[in-house]
Image (spheres, rainbow, N blue to C red):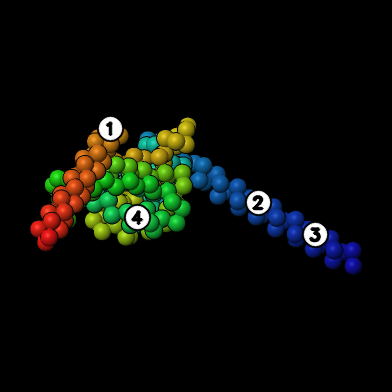
Amino acid sequence: MKEITANKYNNSFFSVVSALLSGLKLTFKHFLGATKRREPTYVDDKNYFNQTDGLVTLTYPYESIPVPDVGRYRLHNEIDDCIVCDLCAKICPVNCIEIEAIKATEDIGITSDGTKKRLYAGVFNIDMAKCCFCGLCTAVCPTDCLTMTKVYDFPEEDVKNIIYHFSDLTPEQAKEKQALYDKQQAENAAAKAAALAAKQQGSK
């Protein structure tokens, strides 16, 4: 009985030593292979993924993991194509998009897809600290001006610095445009009241 136990122990011991030596052999093989690649290689190099041996640790920022085209990362709004429809802010589940629209009193042009612009973006802020990267805002955007870029590394010391402002007006300009719209509305209301009074007086 003792002899069987001793043989079993010896077999286990030698199998462990054998596995350990195999692992060390493989580790040493990769260690020697790592000396074959010393200079950083950018991931856009066509032979990047053909390298089977050598250093595998990425030397950031010279190298980085390829970003897929359908990845969801930092949001960007092309304000010249934005019609300030507010759909993105309404669908956002975490309310990270803040929009204040101002109606234009004049022709402010069209977007790249031919949509007429009727509103200014007095405020268009995106708080990336709140964003859950769901992509719903980009899906509902009618002019495709709101997109998710390939920028995934945007660290800041102050969390307020990752609130991105995309307004096409300064605060002063926004107040001026709002005042012009209010003035136009007041003039239209006065004109309607005068026309109604004239009509009532003529009917007498």
The answer to whether 158 appears left or right of 102 in the picture is right
Q: Quadrant of the C terminus?
A: bottom left
Looking at the rendered structure, the secondary structure element under dot 3 is helix
Disc marking residue 110: none
Mark 2 touching mark 3, by CB under 8 A? no
Q: Type of residue at label 3?
A: Tyr
Separation of disc 2 and disc 3 at Cα?
16 Å
Task: Classify mark 3: residues with Cα within 10 Å, few (<14), some (14-19) or many (20+).
Answer: few
Q: Which residue is mark 3?
A: 9
Residue 69 in view (yes/no): no
Q: Which residue is mark 1?
A: 172
Separation of disc 2 and disc 4 at Cα?
57 Å
Disc marking residue 88: 4
Q: Nearer the viewer, residue 17 or 122?
A: 122
Task: Pick out the residue farthest to the front.
Answer: 204
Q: Earlier in the sequence, mark 3 or mark 1?
A: 3
Q: Nearer the viewer, residue 105 or 147?
A: 105
Looking at the rendered structure, the secondary structure element under dot 4 is helix
Q: Earlier in the sequence, mark 3 or mark 4?
A: 3
Task: Classify mark 4: residues with Cα within 10 Å, few (<14), some (14-19) or many (20+).
Answer: many
Q: Which residue is mark 2?
A: 20
Q: Earlier in the sequence, mark 2 or mark 1?
A: 2
